[in-house]
């Protein structure tokens, strides 16, 4: 399903502000809207984009999504995507991320579809009463010379999406705080933000994974891939607990920051490799905390770790649950214990949805108690059952939490 031209380029040339792919469960309608005009069939508005529209429609259908909105706002140049996978459990909840223009548009669309699907699973497992969604804008960082207009445009699109959202990659904390000042549908700004709780949850899941391997964390070797707002505090805590670590990040400054936060003794327990070497390290647990799309059937046969448990979304390569299950089975056949990423990383969505519900009454201790139950106890129970039965953990998680 490869395409070469961009749908938004065609929308811009045709004066179309938004395209909506809307499923009724059996078929998908693809409609377009010009500014201050009604909806029409998208292929009528942009006849030259029929192949692009068909390609994206196929992607939406494959993932079982309810809706995908593609938006171009000419005044700012905002290229905005909203994917809603399921609203069966409630209105959508999922993060807002930014992708640089160097990333192909089709990759951005597939990413937002995959991420919204993962949020459906994550929110069901966490029992937060929300469906799965994801928002993304495909632009350079918000320009300081036109910041107000950009923030207003983003806030308006967030409100139009009908979802709640929070911080994800590509945005600064200042960006999120400024957006939260403009719309109540941005959450994750209190008590250090959702990344603190996401890291807490992954740590709980890693502890459960270590227990499944039969050793405490301080007797194991872990590879932490990515030292961003989630991976850095997680790696620091694991190092202080005595784990042997190998870390990697594309930004060497993040590695320096981590090492500077450790004592000389703790630093001696930390090795550093290049990002491309992370999957080749012989270790007990691989902890992906950066980009997803890492693990497929071919990679499964080459891994040198015993288990995988991390905070990165969509770690398994796939555009549907069926494809991800194939990758999980390949890992299982290779003797690698894989913890479903949407369970291990549920801490962020628990924090965000509780904050959206409770507002100024939000209590981080209550959020972390719930995160410990989901990311710690439930992962521990899942892995214990998987060990007892010899089954694939993801298959068992799907049976338990997904309709």
Image (tube, helix red, strand yellow):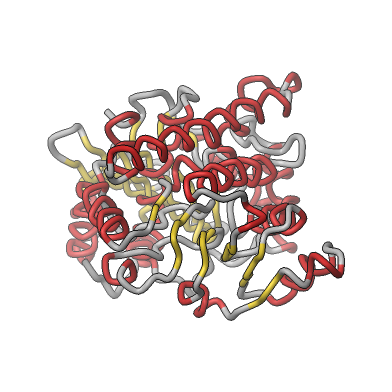
Write the residue at 66% across / 40% down: 197
Q: Quadrant of residue 169?
A: bottom right
Q: Position of residue 63 (x, y in %)?
A: 26, 47
Q: Quadrant of residue 121?
A: top left
Q: Position of residue 141 (x, y in %)?
A: 64, 64
Task: Please state, as top left, top right, bottom left or bottom right, where the C terminus lies in the image.
Answer: top left
In this picture, is 51 found above or below 250? Answer: above
Write the residue at 86% across / 70% down: 264
The reply to whether residue 402 is in sight is: yes
Q: Position of residue 235 (x, y in %)?
A: 68, 58
Task: State the residue lying farthest toward the left.
Answer: 26
The reply to whether residue 120 is in sight is: no
Q: How many marks?
A: 0
The reply, left or right, for residue 236 in relation to residue 198 is right
Task: Please state, as top left, top right, bottom left or bottom right, where the N terminus lies in the image.
Answer: bottom left
The reply, left or right, for residue 251 in relation to residue 338 is right
Write the residue at 45% across / 48% down: 341
In this picture, is 10 found above or below 271? Answer: above
Q: 134 or 401: nearer the eye?
A: 401
In this picture, is 34 found above or below 291? Answer: above
Q: 30 or 206: nearer the eye?
A: 206
In this picture, is 38 found above or below 88? Answer: below
Q: 119 or 249: nearer the eye?
A: 249
Q: 298 or 14: nearer the eye?
A: 298
């Amino acid at each position: 399903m490869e395409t070469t031209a961009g749908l938004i380029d065609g929308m811009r040339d045709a004066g179309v502000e938004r395209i909506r792919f809307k499923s009724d469960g059996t078929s998908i309608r693809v409609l377009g809207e010009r500014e201050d005009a009604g909806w029409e069939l998208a292929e009528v508005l942009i006849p030259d984009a029929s192949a692009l529209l068909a390609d994206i429609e196929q992607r939406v259908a494959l993932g079982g999504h309810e809706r995908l909105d593609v938006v171009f706002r000419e005044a700012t140049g905002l290229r905005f995507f909203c994917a809603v996978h399921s609203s069966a459990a409630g209105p959508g909840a999922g993060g807002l991320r930014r992708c640089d223009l160097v990333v192909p548009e089709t990759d951005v669309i597939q990413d937002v579809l995959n991420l919204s699907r993962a949020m459906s699973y994550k929110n069901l497992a966490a029992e937060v009463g929300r469906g799965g969604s994801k928002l993304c804008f495909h632009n350079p960082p918000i320009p300081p010379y036109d910041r107000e207009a950009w923030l207003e445009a983003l806030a308006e699109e967030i409100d139009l999406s009908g979802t709640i959202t929070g911080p994800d990659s590509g945005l600064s904390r200042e960006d999120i705080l400024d957006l939260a000042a403009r719309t109540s549908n941005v959450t994750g700004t209190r008590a250090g933000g959702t990344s603190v709780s996401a890291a807490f949850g992954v740590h709980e899941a890693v502890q459960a994974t270590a227990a499944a391997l039969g050793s405490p964390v301080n007797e194991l070797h872990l590879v932490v891939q990515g030292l961003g707002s989630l991976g850095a505090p997680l790696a620091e805590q694991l190092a202080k607990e005595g784990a042997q670590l190998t870390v990697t990040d594309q930004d060497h400054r993040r590695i320096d920051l981590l090492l500077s936060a450790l004592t000389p003794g703790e630093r001696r327990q930390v090795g550093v490799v290049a990002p491309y070497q992370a999957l080749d390290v012989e270790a007990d647990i691989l902890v992906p905390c950066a980009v997803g799309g890492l693990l497929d059937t071919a990679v499964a046969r080459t891994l040198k770790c015993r288990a995988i448990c991390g905070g990165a979304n969509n770690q398994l390569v796939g555009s549907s649950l069926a494809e991800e299950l194939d990758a999980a089975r390949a890992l299982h056949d290779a003797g690698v214990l894989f913890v479903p990423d949407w369970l291990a990383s549920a801490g962020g969505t628990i924090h965000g949805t509780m904050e959206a519900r409770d507002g100024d009454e939000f209590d981080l201790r209550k959020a972390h108690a719930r995160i410990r139950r989901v990311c710690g106890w439930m992962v521990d129970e899942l892995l214990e059952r998987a060990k007892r039965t010899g089954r694939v953990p993801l298959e068992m998680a799907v049976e338990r939490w997904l309709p």
